[in-house]
Amino acid sequence: MSGQTIAILGAAFAAALAGVGSAWGVGNAGVAAAGVTSEKPELFGKLLILQALPGTQGIYGFLAAVLIMVNIGVLGGNAGTIDLATGWSYFWAAAPIAIAGLASAFFQGKAAAASIHMTGKSPDAFVKGMTMTALVETYAILGLLVSILLIFGI
Amino acid sequence: MIAPMKKAKIVFLKEDKDAVLKALQRIGELMVIKTEESSETLDSSKDEVFVQRTQRSLQVIKPYTGKKKPFGIGEYCAVNYKDFVNPDYHGNQEILDEIEKADSEIAKLKAENDSSKEFINFLSPWDGLEGKLSNIYTSKYTTIHTGFIPLKLVEDFKKQFENFESDLKQFQVSSDTVAFMLVNWREDDASIMDQIKGFGFMEVSLPNEEKTLKELVAEKQQHIDDNLKKIGEIEEELKKYASKEQEIKIFSDQMETQKILKETPVVNTVDTIYLEGWVKKNKAEKIKKAVESATDTYDLEIVDPEEGEVVPTALENPKLISNFEPITDMFSRPNSKEIDPNPVMSFWYWIIFGLMMADFGYGAVLAIGTFLIMKLLKPRGMMKKLIKVFFLGSITTMIWGIIFGSYFGAEFHPLWFVPSNDPISMLILSLVLGVVHLSCGLIIKAVSQIRDGHILDAIFDEVSWILVMVGLSLSLSQFCANMLPTSPVIPPTVMTAGYIIAGVGAVIILFTAGRGKKNIFGKVVGGLLGLYGVTGYLSDILSYARILALCMSSAIVAYVMNLLAGMVGANGVIGFIFSLLIYLVGHVFNLAMGLLSTYVHDSRLQYIEFFGKFYEGGGVDFKPLALEYKYVNEINDVI
């Protein structure tokens, strides 16, 4: 395996794992949102916001993947040769957002689903639910932060 | 600013009740409250019924209001106060009656048609059946069965029947069954029916009518057509009422207003009425004037709230700041004793909003979009304020976009640095902003403690932490500077000053955090635990890294969209069209996701990090007795 292949592996994992987590989370929240909407269609707008919250991890993973692609020259640049060590560096730089994104999106989806049920019962609690759900995302953001700093540091 | 409140106690004659309450409702400055004595309200169920009826009728005529100008332009509705408080019961009731009658008539006709259609469906498999239906089962020597056989068993069924001396007539084939008519000799009937049991013959009996099948279907079809025609006529009738939409809407608001008026709690004595309520201190004079205008015989007392009384919170902020009030209210309404967080919060919300979006193009689109929404849709209440928050946020978005040189994700002469090329600078900016933001929260807490006379507490609990945060930030400045691309050199005195400041703060905390404890052991542990609180501050400050994450993610997605559009765009005309599509859809998606994240995370920074330092909340909303209108936009000459 060349260094580039390993770096690409890292980029692919960042986008894929974080994306899987987000799909999971948004899907889980969507099931709850659809259930509540069937009873209270007027809450659709609020529920949609809650449902979309676990979707950001996918974007973060995508972001890390793009940064790696740009850095190794796969995207919009000159593809130079990358040695094996650098390739592995990129791979591990992608790990924090890949893993933290996967797990945090999964659990954020659960929190979002619970908040959706809560909003269904008392619509005024919407912002409280939103804040609770957003708390989970902090760890994806920290993961992304580390990934970005690592990618730029290589 | 939280407006200071006064309590108004009013006594007036029973015969003036209506006039006084109406006058109070007109000015809309008094929040009448239930007193401990037996407050009574009037029965408002009639008005409630009217409110519901108007809403139902509005729904009924909605499809017929037709030719609506897009976004409801020109629907602005202003009513004079005199007209508003004198509802036309007779006329409106007539309109409502007519609309309801038409609505139930349509429902009845539609239900009839549904059952007719069902009947036609039931007969459809027997298409081709000759003769009057009442005659098909009557025969001297034969027994006749009609029914269905599952499609997959039909071939076997037919084969089986070749053995019998019976007549088998096949009718229409449906998706999974075939309709058959069996004509058996009477004496064979029982045995044949027994033998075909295994084929799942589902017997049905056709209606016993003196008509042929064709006639029956035609008759039902005719009935359906007639009903459709009638429905058309009624709908035509309803279209006439569509022009009354405005009147119904006004009537609905009138009834809501009356309902509120009737539900005002007052204390009835033999000859007088007593009520009390909250009024803003500077509006007390208006209450007096309003009561004076309604009656000569009254007693009005304006007093200060008593100790421990729950005072509602009325906010009085400049218009610009008041737009941000819903953001605080959605978390918790400020209570009447604390400092209104809105003026400071709104400024930070505004700055951080722009920093999270940080693109001139997106800011411009957002500005135009929210401006159009405000002008065309004319949102009300909380929605209006929220849209205005986004509009104001678009201004900082454009400013930061220019500073970072970001125009729809394309880089153009940044004034400072580009976050996606230089995340370290952006991270440091975010965290520094966090330190200042948190310090603002601590300062507010300190001010309110000083206001209450607890100056030492303010120094021990808030000033000390500001010293620690600022001191540590200063002492880390060279470490941070080394990571910047330019690696500026910070004078060592700054670092030394930082160590000293942080040290002073830490010492204050160490010696005072345990001051509430009685014994010396408790004081020492309390001090150490207080110092341990630094971890909380660390996580609070790190939380501001989300500014970097959001700013970068929207910038990178925009960059990728531009890249993709550019790659596709090189391939001739079709490529150009596709690239345009990618460009538009991509940026709209990115803007929408960015807006959602910005709204959520900007709010979160205020709620968790900023409010966590000082805010109590839990206040009661100040809801004065006022004219209630949801459809009417404005009532003229209220005051």
Image (cartoon, grey):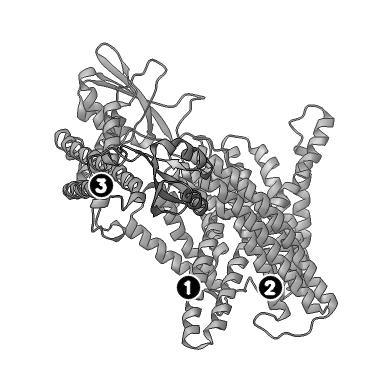
Where residue A115 appears, x then y in whole percent? Answer: 58, 43
Label number found at residue B131: 3
- The amino acid type found where label 2 is placed reads Leu
**Quarter location, residue B142:** top left
Q: Identify which residue, A90 or B231, lies in the foreground.
A: B231
Which residue does the image show at 33% across and 45% down from the upper left?
B118
Q: Chain of mark 3?
A: B
* Residue bearing mark 1: B584
- The amino acid type found where label 3 is placed reads Gly
- Taking the image as shown, residue B108 lies to the left or right of residue B205, namely left
Question: Callout 3: few (<14), some (14-19), or many (20+) C-alpha neighbours within 10 Å?
Answer: few
Q: Are marks 1 and 3 in contact (CB under 8 Å)?
A: no
Q: Secondary structure at mark 1?
A: helix
Front label number (2 vs 3): 3
Q: Identify which residue, B203 or B570, lies in the foreground.
A: B203
Which of the two labelled residues, at mark 1 and mark 3, occupies the earlier sequence position? 3
* Residue bearing mark 2: A67
